[in-house]
Amino acid sequence: RPVDVAHANPDGMSAPDACFLIHISEATILDNLRHRFKANSIYTYTGSILIAVNPFQLLPVYGTDKMEPYPNKPLGIAEPHAYAMAEEAYKTYVRSKGSQSLVVSGESGSGKTETNKHLMQYIAWRTRSEMVGDDLAGAILKVNPILESFGNAKTSRNNNSSRFGKFVKVGLSEKGRVLGAITRQYLLEKSRIPFQSKGERTYHVFYQVMASPHQKALGLGDGPAKFWYMSQSGTYTADGIDDKEWFANTTSSLGSIGLDADRTMQLYKLIAGVLHLGNVCFDGGDDADSSVGAASAATLAAAEELLGLRGLARDLTIHEVQAGGGRAQAGSRAPTSGAGVVKHERDATSFGLFS
C-alpha cells in the first residue's frame, strides 16, 4: 500500500532549532530530537516553541551558573533551554509592560511539573538580580512542595505526576520586581483518594504523614497496608521519593506561608482523619437502612477525634433532603416537617414530591 516518504537529512545531522534542518518533516524533526537526546541535549527549538524530552534523570543543566548566558539575549542565541523561554517572557514584559504567558503542555510523564519549577526558579533569580535583597520570589518557590504533596502522586508512568491543572499568576512591577503570586488549581483528580489502580499511589501527603514522627499520635501506627485508601494498589513506595524527607519539606513550606506548629498539626490530623474514615464499613448494603458496622466503632471514633466532629455515624448513613418546604431523611420513615415528602433512597434525583 502507498506510504508517506520524506527526504532525509545527511546522516548524523542535528540542529538546536528544527527550522535549521535542510529537510523539515515529522520524521526529520523526530530524528533531530533523537540525536540531541543521545547527547543529553534535552531541549530543542522549533521556531519560538521549545520541545523538551524528559530524560528521567537529573542532568547538570540547571542551576544559577547555567542561567548566566540568558539575560538580555534574543531567543535562539544561547542553547535551547527553559531558562531562555522564561527570559523571553520576562524581557518582553519589561519592554512592553504587557502581560505574558508561558504555556507548558504535554502527556503524563513528559516533565511539565519539573519544567514549571525551572521556569519559576529562573524568574525568581532574574528578579533578584534586578532587585537585590528581595526574597519574595524565593518565598513563592517555597510553596511548590505543598502543591506537590497535595496534588501529585505516583502513577504507572510517572512517580511524581501532577494530578491537577495549575495556573500561576506572578505580579511584577514596571521594573520587573516580583510583587506577589497567585496559584489557581483546577480539575483535581479527586477519585484518586478513594481508589488507586495497581502499581499506583494516592497523593504523596498521605505517605508523608504515615512516615512522619506523628504516625502513632495520629493513629497510623499499623502502617499503610491497614488503610483502605492506601492499600488497594499494593504499592506504598515510589523510586526517587523519600516520604520522610518530603514530609520535612512540606512542613517547612507550610511554615513559610504562615502556618504555625498547631495549625500544621491540625492539617495533618485532617489527613489522618480521612484515612480512618476510609476504613469505616457499613451493615445493610446501600439501602436507606444501612448503619455503621460494629467492627468500625474504633476507627470511627478515631476519625471523629481527628476531624473534630461528633455524630459521624448518623451523618454517614442519613441523607437529609429539603424540597417543597418539607424535610425528609434517608433512613427515616417520615418527614421531619411539612407534608408529602416521601422516603429518599440515596439518589437525589429519585425522590417524589406530592402536594
Image (cartoon, helix red, strand yellow):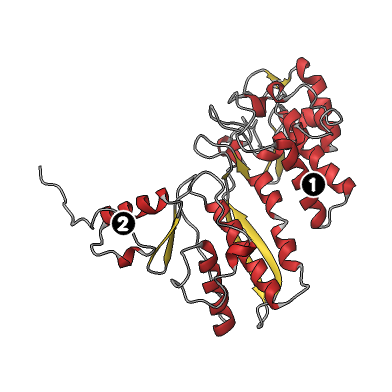
The kind of residue on which mark 1 rests is Thr
Under circle 2, the secondary element is helix
The kind of residue on which mark 2 rests is Ile
Under circle 1, the secondary element is helix
For the point 66% across and 28% down, the residue is 230
- Please state, as top left, top right, bottom left or bottom right, where the N terminus lies in the image: top left
Q: Position of residue 194 (x, y in %)?
A: 63, 32
Q: Quadrant of residue 131?
A: bottom right
Q: Is residue 65 above or below residue 100?
A: above
The answer to whether any part of residue 348 appears in the image is no
How many numbered tags mark residues here? 2
Give the mark nearest the N terminus, 2 or 1.
2
From the viewer's perspective, tell me whether residue 152 is left or right of residue 326.
left
From the viewer's perspective, tell me whether residue 253 is left or right of residue 104.
right
The residue tagged 2 is: 29
For the point 77% across and 19% down, the residue is 296
Q: Position of residue 237 (x, y in %)?
A: 64, 30
Q: Position of residue 203 (x, y in %)?
A: 65, 39
